[in-house]
Amino acid sequence: MKRALDLRRLSWGLCLAIGACAAWPAQAQRVIVVASAATEPYQQALDGVTQLDVSVERFRLVPEQEGAIVAAIRRGGRDTAVIALGGAAALVVAHARSAPNSGPIVNCMVVDAASAHAPTRASAVIDVPLAVPASTEAASIRRLLPQARTAGILYDPARSEARAAESAVAMANEGFATIREAVPIPAALPVALQRMQDHADLLYALPDTTVYAREHARALLLFSFRHRIPLVGPTESWVKAGALFAIDWDYVDLGRYCGVLALQQLAGARTSPRPPRIRIVANRHTARQLRIEWDAEQLRLIDRMYP
């Protein structure tokens, strides 16, 4: 019996070390997942969490469920991890999970990590940002647009100052010059685009809801087509509308990653799971309009091509 127990502990340790805990059931462990909305990225991330071999209690953040969510979180002890998908869910979880014997919290897909934390942080909190790392984006842009030299970055300084600076450094590391234009209010967008039209040969979109609001899509896409400046969109929906390509998470894999982080925290592990994979979507029609031709190696980078 002792030998069997030792072997099980050894297997669990190896599982954590290689980041493959999904194959090993966690004894007496529970995971509560709270999704901010029912949109496709949250649902895909939730699917990734539920693929793990562990008991998962799922909630969607709607007014009629908020009381049940808080009650379920407060019933959980050290053997229960909570995963919040999105900033709204992270705020509810942070205020509900304040007991000294609380288990870990993983805030997954959060834009502003600091605002997701309640004043009391009794349990371990891990933040997994919604944005793909700037270095990953820059490397992918370089591989898909090898002839481009100068990237234009539009951003709202109140929302994206730090990300714009980080992205500029990442693009510089890939050999790009950058032009940063602040867009503090929507009325500033046309002037910023005009200043870029003779200097930038690609527009690099940040996850900035001031600049890349839905009502600005037409103006940005028309600018891209008229001046033959590729727009690297912030999301897949922008690619459907006409952006050349976008770099985003594989949200099922991102959910798996957050789930494994939660299990590792419950087990007291110090290793990191395999990073989530990214997903690149592109628009074939836009590539033709911009006279961009990708070779077979570049096409292998693209997970989905819209016609």
Image (cartoon, rainbow, N blue to C red):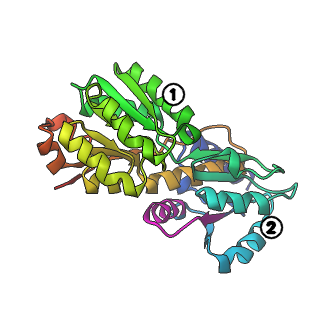
Q: In which quarter of the image is the N terminus?
A: bottom right
User: Circle 1 sits on which residue?
Assistant: 165
Q: Where is residue 100 in the image (x, y as percent from the top left)?
A: 88, 54
Q: Can residue 165 be seen in this view?
A: yes
Write down the region rendered in magenta. Answer: 32-49
Quarter location, residue 226: top left
Residues at discs 2 and 1 in contact (Cβ within 8 Å): no
Q: Position of residue 115 (x, y in %)?
A: 69, 49
**Residue in the picture at 67% in, 38% down:** 270
**Residue in the picture at 25% in, 38% down:** 230
Q: Is residue 201 in the magenta section? A: no
Q: What residue type is labelled 1?
A: Ala
Above or below: residue 189 compared with residue 254: above
Q: Distance between the residues labelled 2 and 1?
A: 40 Å
Which element is circle 1 on?
helix
Q: Position of residue 280 (x, y in %)?
A: 32, 46
Local crowd size for mark 1, using a 10 Å CA cut-off: few (<14), some (14–19), many (≥20): some
Q: Which amino acid does label 2 sit on?
A: Arg
User: Circle 2 sits on which residue?
Assistant: 74
